[in-house]
Amino acid sequence: MSEGKNPRRGFIAASAAAGIGLAVAPGIRLLQAAESVPTRPAGQPASSKVRWGMLVDTTKCAAGCDACVKACNKENAINEVVEDRRQASQWIRKIDLKDKKTGREFSLPMMCQHCANPPCVDVCPTGASMKRADGIVLVDRHICIGCRYCMMACPYKARSFVHAELHAQNPEVPRGKGCVESCTMCVHRVDRGEKPACVEACKQQAMVFGDLKDPNSDISKRIAAVPSDQIRADLNLDPGVRYQGI
Ligand code: SF4
Ligand code: SF4
């Protein structure tokens, strides 16, 4: 297997192949979730009664399409200019994979997997890397000292270090030079009852967002109905992002 575009993150292709066994479920199509996302009123803490997650249908994710990446960059104002592209922040990236045994090629988006047992949180010396009660893993930029232990601990290479000066930021998405950051599952949108920007932007309707703890949510019903996998499930991190067709 080979991963396209970003060499720094190339190991994930092999990891994906090793950990998920490439159980393919062809011909199964998911529809975009029509349900609404419940809001979290201001001042109320996140609830452990929900666990936010995503299901990505790789049979619908088109190679060469990066609408989710563009939407993430726009939503979170990831727009800084860096001389070395390896220093660019990247909260979501597309990975092109090839199964060496069958020759099947497919494409998937990779972002923070919002692990239930996140090693990035375990290694953080300040508590900046944290998991909310509803499963969303975040970094508090006010506490982050930029040590980058969490970047080394994350097996999905999901985190970035902010090298550049930041301008024209989204006030709802605090970022900071010298801090580590990663996909927030668009927590600012989720808290007001909206879906993540990448999910909304996917014209293939390959991404479903919802509450993994609610058996009646679209995502739970679909996970119950079709085979899906966690990438590197062998690590027992219990990611909240699941993949169909890998
Ligand atoms: Fe942390 Fe990486 Fe898991 Fe996200 S994918 S929760 S950054 S270990
Ligand atoms: Fe980016 Fe939001 Fe999608 Fe995460 S959920 S990859 S922050 S658009």
Image (cartoon, rainbow, N blue to C red):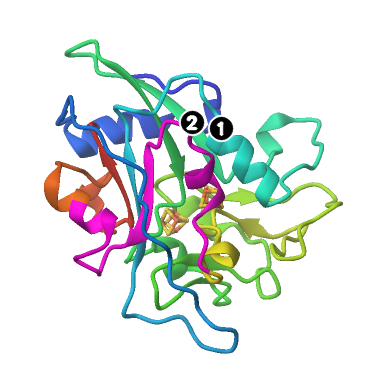
| Residue at the spot 52% in from the left edge and 61% down from the top edge | 194
Range of residues picked out in magenta: 193-221
In terms of depth relative to the viewer, which is nearer, 139 or 29?
Answer: 29
Residue under numbered circle 1: 67
Depicted 148 relative to depicted 23: above or below:
below
On screen, residue 80 above or below 167: above
Left or right: residue 26 compared with residue 184: left
Q: Position of residue 78 (x, y in %)?
A: 71, 46
Q: Is residue 178 magenta?
A: no
Q: In the figure, residue 179 lies in which quadrant?
A: bottom right
Counting labels gives 2
Helix, strand or loop at disc 2?
strand
Q: CA distance from mark 1 to mark 2?
A: 10 Å
Residue at image position (76%, 58%) is: 170
Q: Which mark is residue 94?
A: 2
Q: The residue under label 1 is which amino acid type?
A: Ala
Q: Which of 122/183 is in front?
A: 183
Labels 1, 2: front one: 1
